[in-house]
Amino acid sequence: MSFSWINMLRGIALAGLLLAVEPVRAEYLRIQLRVYGLDCGLCARGVSANIQRMAGVKSVDVNLKQGLLEIVLLPGNTFKMSDLRKRIRENGFRSMEATVTAVGEYKGSKFEVLGTGESYNAGSPDSKAPAPVELTFDVR
Amino acid sequence: MPAWGDGEGPAFGYSTAILGPGNASIETTFMWRSGVTMFGPQLSYGLMENLQISVSASFHLDHGDLPTGRFTAMMPGDPQVEVILGWRFFHKSPAIGTRNEATLYGGVSALTQDVPRADGPPLRRQPGYYVAAAAGHVSRRYDVWVGAGYQGYGTWSRGVDDRQSNSVLTSLVVGWRPPFFDHDYPKPDVRFFWETTGGVIGQAQRGVAPPGSTGGHDEGTAPPPPPPNSSGIVVLPNSGGTGVFSGPTFLCTYRSVAFQGGVLFALWNQPNGVQPSEKVRAVAGVTYYFLRGRR
């Protein structure tokens, strides 16, 4: 086996490329959450400000009449749905069903938002789809 | 946070709302009752889910000879520093924009100003306590709250028997958000209430000073006191009374600020002795909220 500068440079370039490409993270991207009990402007402001303060949250919109929170999250967040529900409960309200867009992987029949420990029954896995996948699904 | 410009509910009566953990509010309120003017700043802080602490320091700007006792839910009617814990022990949110809640309040207080009396020198200052309960239903269109509380007074030291009037306050509040004001957040949120309060204010008492002692009282200017009872205590006839007041109040919130005010009119008022009758009570206040919660 002979030493080749060209092969060595190819190896270094390949290793650098692998290191430079950021792995696709699993995360929540968008959450539309129904909340019961929001009856006033201050309630909306309180919940909105509290959620806005959670790590990874980009924006929060409140629709009082429909009792809906629309939460957009920053890339690379470590946001957890369970923390969101807890925050809402602490403020005196009740979180209900949600429509969630997240990046994750199927583990068996469950769609898991990797790194959060949270998984959902979100349809059937597509065997041809690359992992991780972005998926929008309803959470009851 | 209930009462005195609370941003959530009525101006005079009881309500149930509790600040979330890490949230805070500061409010300033003027209250006027037929010649008596009071000013009351209050700080409130959400300690944890369903538990809130409030500290208020109401004081007289101008005083009269009306019966003194509690006539708003979250502020004492006498000039005193008061600390109240509010515990929302029940809450359900059965639908969009709807909540059913119940809250208990307990507090302690200390008088900070002498309360002038027409029938003699001011009573010596005492500590007090306060317990109350409220329950209600809130929604986007209608609110209803009922509540009752008891304000009592003790003594700083044995043998000092001066007491301000103990009092019971009850309230029924009906709120309405007219369709015209039923805007979505973050537009201003306006609600109107019809508040009715019923109060029973007990008679104040004066401990009789031992012979040769003024006991801190300005006995030289006081009229002759009524005779003491068998315990040596003079129950002051010109103190206390009963009354029912009713009237409209409003609440407007925009962003982190709440404006609140209203007027209650006497439906029935029966002060004891020769005290003047009270016709009108009014409140105006502003509250600022720090709704950042905790990290």
Image: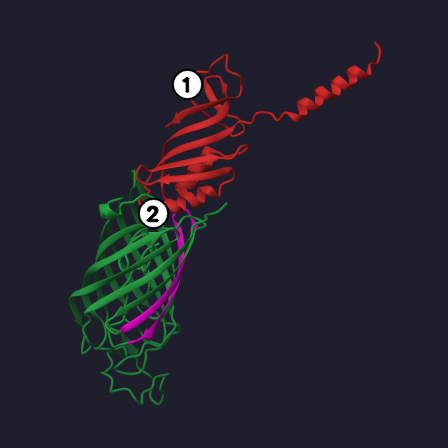
Chain colours: A red, B green
Tell me, yes or no, if residue B142 can be seen here.
no
Residue under label 1, please give it: A123
Relative to A23, is B216 above or below? below
Question: Which chain does the residue under circle 2 lie in?
Answer: B
Give the CA distance from mark 2 to mark 1: 39 Å
Residue at 48% across, 30% down:
A28
x, y (%) of residue B99?
29, 43
Q: Please tell me whether mark 1 sits on a helix, a strand or a loop.
A: loop
x, y (%) of residue B280?
21, 68
> Are the residues under badges 2 and 1 in a single subunit?
no
User: Residue B29, located in which quarter of the rendered image?
Assistant: bottom left
Q: Is residue B229 left or right of residue B57?
A: left
Question: What label does residue B187 carry, if any?
Answer: 2
Mark 2 or mark 1, whichever is nearer to me: 2
Relative to A123, is B159 above or below? below
User: Residue B281, located in which quarter of the rendered image?
Assistant: bottom left
x, y (%) of residue B245?
19, 63
Q: Is residue A25 left or right of residue B35?
A: right
Question: Which chain does the residue under circle 1 lie in?
Answer: A
x, y (%) of residue A17?
68, 22
Residue type, mark 1 in image: Gly
Does the segment drawn in magenta span residue B38? Answer: yes
Q: Quadrant of the N terminus of chain B?
A: bottom left
Residue at 61% across, 26% down:
A22
Residue type, mark 2 in image: Lys
Q: Nearer the viewer, residue A15 or B84?
A: A15
Q: Which residues are magenta?
A: B36-63
